[in-house]
């Protein structure tokens, strides 16, 4: 079993909260603030044929997601198996599985039980000069993709 210093515990908690805040913005704010989670020169790979560079590239990606989103579509993301690794006090990585549920309708949506997508995610994170953690690299590798997945919609472009 791994052991942690007090500083690593604090950094690990901050990175866990970064992930939680990221997906909260996706679920409750239509991803409007997500570009602010990234470094200016970040790399974003969201799956097959989905790759963007820089914070402005991430902004374009999420603007495109909003533009193609069915207005009645409701999404929730569940993070599981989160694992933080620290390289040093200013560099860490986070690995987790994101389970995405999506359906059209007004909550509570009945009969919608299967996830629309299950994705392995790896983040490389850096602490900026102000002490705030940012994502330098996002790599999502979809494992299971259902018919209601936004990935299906985005990959058609």
Image: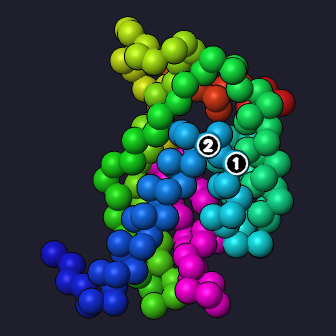
What residue is shown at x 71% (from left), y 59% (from top)? 35
Across and down, in percent, residue 50 comes to 73, 44
Number of the label disc, if any, that sits on residue 32: 1
Q: How many marks?
A: 2
User: Which quarter of the picture shows residue 107?
Assistant: top left
Secondary structure category for the residue under label 2? loop
Residue 96: % across, % down: 40, 55
Structural crowding at the residue carrying mark 1, measured as other residues with C-alpha within 10 Å and reported as few (<14), some (14–19) or many (≥20): some
Q: Which residues are magenta?
A: 120-142
Q: Residue at x 55, y 25 (%)?
A: 74
Is residue 155 in sight in this rendering?
no
The answer to whether residue 140 is magenta is yes
- Magenta stretch: helix, strand or loop mostly: strand
At x 31%, y 53%, the residue is: 81
Give coordinates of residue 100: x percent, y percent.
Answer: 47, 34
C-alpha gap between disc 1 and disc 2? 6 Å
Does the rendering let one see residue 129? yes
Q: Which mark is residue 29?
A: 2
Q: What numbered label is drawn on residue 88?
A: none
Is residue 138 on the magenta stretch? yes
């Amino acid at each position: 079993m791994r052991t942690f210093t007090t500083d690593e515990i604090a950094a690990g908690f901050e990175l866990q909260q970064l992930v939680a805040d990221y997906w909260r913005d996706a679920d409750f704010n239509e991803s409007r603030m997500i570009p602010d989670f990234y470094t200016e020169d970040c790399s974003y790979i969201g799956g097959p044929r989905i790759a963007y560079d820089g914070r402005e590239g991430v902004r374009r990606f999420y603007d495109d997601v909003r533009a193609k989103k069915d207005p009645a579509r409701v999404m929730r993301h569940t993070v599981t198996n989160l694992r933080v690794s620290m390289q040093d006090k200013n560099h860490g990585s986070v690995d987790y599985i994101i389970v995405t549920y999506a359906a059209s309708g007004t909550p509570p949506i009945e009969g919608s039980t299967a996830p629309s997508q299950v994705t392995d995610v790896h983040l490389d994170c850096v602490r900026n000069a102000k002490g705030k953690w940012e994502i330098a690299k996002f790599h999502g590798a979809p494992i299971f993709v259902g018919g209601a997945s936004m990935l299906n919609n985005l990959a058609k472009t």
